[in-house]
Amino acid sequence: MRGVPKKLLLLGGSAQQVIAIKTAKRLGCETILCDYLPDNPGRCEADRFYLVSTTDEQAVLKVARREQVDGVLAYASDPAAPTAAYVAEKLGLPGNPYKSVVTLCSKDKFRKFLVENGFAAPSAWGCPDMETVLKKREQFHYPVIVKPVDSSGSKGATVLRSADGLERAAEFAFSFSRCHRIVIEEFVEQKHPFLIGGDVFVKDGKIVLWGLLNCHRDPRVNPLVPVGKSYPLRLEAGDIRRVKDTLSAMVEKLGIRNGPMNVELIVDKENRVFLIDVGPRSGGNMIPELLGDLFGVNAAEMSIEAAMGLSIHGGFHAPTGFYATHNLHSDRSGVYQGVRFAPELERYIYRKCLYKKPGDAVEFFDNASKCLGIVFMKFPSAEEMQRYLDDISRYITVEVRGSEHE
């Protein structure tokens, strides 16, 4: 890698993480992979593989010492991010402060950080068990959102407009929490049509890449689960400035030095910026690939450079055009038959990434892990893009029949 070959330890070998392994090898790195699944796709790409959970800090540290790695990277993975920071800190490798990464990866700790540092934050109550939920139920100000403290992709999250269904929502959230802890927080109403999401990239303590996007949802299946992104951001100039100021202040307070951050935030009707979730890693759903199309950057390459302590090369250019992604999904479980794209939309699609083949089982889309594939689109105008995205189910049909046992 620009000289003497170096070793990079990668945490996670899922389909969306393979690009980091391939990129590292292309840059001349020797790649070592940890994953708890023996049949993960990354195993076939990495130089060496260890069947080790990416959340087991001590086991991963043992691998890192054995291999004498020069860097560690948890690409597009919230659960593995604290492990990467822990190993880097223990071995004196490039990375961000372990305490700050843990704060970002735990929703109740992040809320506490926001309050203590003067950021706008919803009222929130951390709960380690159902007994605490029931004991605090009179304190909740509805509507609230109930979610695990340590999950991403809206897994285990429920919005409640009243106390009806509280126990069921709490049990659902607990079922997705690795540490068996949930947070119940005030649901803040936004003033703009879409949540603000995407990735930013930090270099030498400053945000240098602003990949802020509109986050689209499908209320027919789950109003909390993202089904795509679009650009440019549909937000007033003053609000964009406040968003950037807020994110910059957060990076400074946490002492984040280098690397990507996946963000989700809103501006309320009083023009306050609320940081909903911030992950110390690249986003899923192929956000890095979309930002590559927009800015002419290689997000995986930049992440590897940050993890190895190398000079981060960007060479961004200003985006031109109107871009969108759509996460293919099903409103019912069954057997996948295929996907049809209306001809009038097909002319705007420039990339298709399909995860399923006919005959595969598919599940109802209640969290991001049930995505069937992603399509990338470029439109000639904002109006044309909005027209298609507002009625996307009319132009994309995912064909599913019965159940897999029929």
Image (tube, rainbow, N blue to C red):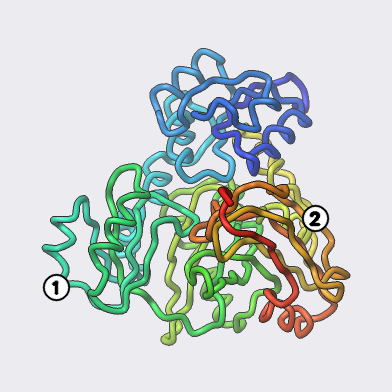
Does residue 225 lie above or below 40 as drawn? below
Q: Could you say where residue 183 lies in the image, as x and y percent from the top left? A: 29, 59
Tell me how far mark 1 sits from mark 2, CA to CA: 51 Å
Q: Could you say where residue 343 lies in the image, as x and y percent from the top left? A: 86, 72
* Numbered mark located on residue 296 in the image: 2
Q: Is residue 146 left or right of residue 89?
A: left
Upstream in sequence: badge 1 or badge 2? 1
| Residue 15 seen in this snapshot | yes
Pick whichever, 361 or 179, lies toward us. Answer: 361
Does residue 225 lie above or below 337 as drawn? below
Q: Residue at x 48, y 26 (%)?
A: 92
Q: Secondary structure at mark 1?
A: helix
Q: Residues within 10 Å of mark 2 (few under 14, many from 20)?
A: some
Q: Could you say where residue 253 lies in the image, as x and y percent from the top left? A: 41, 55
Q: Residue at x 26, y 78 (%)?
A: 162
Q: Residue at x 69, y 62 (%)?
A: 399
Q: Residue at x 65, y 61 (%)?
A: 327
Pick whichever, 307 or 148, lies toward us. Answer: 148
Q: Could you say where residue 158 lies in the image, as x and y percent from the top left? A: 37, 66
Residue, disc 1: 138
Q: Is residue 120 left or right of residue 397?
A: left
